[in-house]
Amino acid sequence: MAQSSIEWTEMTWNPTTGCDKVSAGCKFCYAEVMSKRLKAMGIEKYQNGFDIKIHEEELKKPYSWKKPRVVFVNSMSDLFHPDVPVDFIQKVFKVMKENPQHVFQLLTKRPEILKYYDSEGWLDWSHNIWMGISVEDERVMDRIDLLRDTNARVKFLSCEPLIGPLPNMNLEKIDWVIVGGESGRKPRPMDTDWVTDIKDQCKKANVAFFFKQWGGTNKKKTGRELEGRTWDEMPIIAENY
């Protein structure tokens, strides 16, 4: 586990590492860059670089966390990558369900795999497992429908990096939307109108809205205020949701 600087979570937990690119949002993948750095530092967990690797030993760790936490699962991977065996995914779900004091946030760019596994009854959802999908521009808006059709109790969208407008989204059964601009050496620009439109869509649909950052080459300088304030809304979910 590791404490996280990501604004919408508290810590990260990586039972798998590695991934590969599937859409435009992956172009400047921070996890790929970080994996190379960690490999160069001699960190054993990342000696395979950004190839998919399963870490069975990680499954024990959540049982040792005493204080309730908000946990981003696989910040360095995608649990629904086709090279991750479904039986290992089921083990991860079992760990999350058996630790209901924590909130586990999952994020994938492969909702077609997520939906298939869910439709087969292979995923055991509980109230503390939040399922998200990445939606960076209009070309991948169909991912929202795939997420909506799953049995996840809490569903959210991560519109980061937002590299295009997302007009007229169907936010039915969506609980939370995160928006953020790209950061790094060559970030693609994010238009203010794209952000405010998503915020307005969330308000109209009564969906929690979280604005993470403007991004850019100096994300600390550009900050995370929108319309003169920060937006840190989170979904309020009861256990019987």
Image (tube, rainbow, N blue to C red):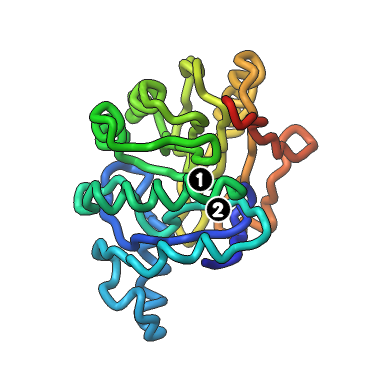
Q: Position of residue 2 (x, y in %)?
A: 55, 67
Residue at x-position 67% and y-position 51% = 222
Closest to the observer, 14 or 203: 14
Lower position in the chain sequence, tag 2 or tag 1 = 2
Image quadrant where residue 142 sits? top left
Residue at x-position 56% and y-position 43% = 180
Query: For the residue labelled by badge 1, is the local secondary structure a helix, a strand or a loop?
Result: strand
Q: Position of residue 1 (x, y in %)?
A: 52, 66
Image quadrant where residue 240 sits? top right
What amino acid type should be assigned to the residue bearing mark 1? Gln
Q: Which residue is mark 1?
A: 105
Q: Is residue 53 left or right of residue 39?
A: left
Q: Is residue 205 left or right of residue 166?
A: right
Q: Label 2: how many residues lie within 10 Å, few (<14), some (14-19) or many (20+)?
A: many
Residue at x-position 73% and y-position 42% = 225
Q: Position of residue 191 (x, y in %)?
A: 55, 34
Q: Is 106 located above or below residue 38 in the figure?
A: above
Q: Is residue 160 left or right of residue 114?
A: right
Closest to the observer, 77 or 14: 14
Residue 71 numbered tag? 2
What amino acid type should be assigned to the residue bearing mark 2? Val
Q: Position of residue 170 (x, y in %)?
A: 46, 16
Closest to the observer, 139 or 65: 65
**Disc 2 + disc 1, Cβ < 8 Å:** yes
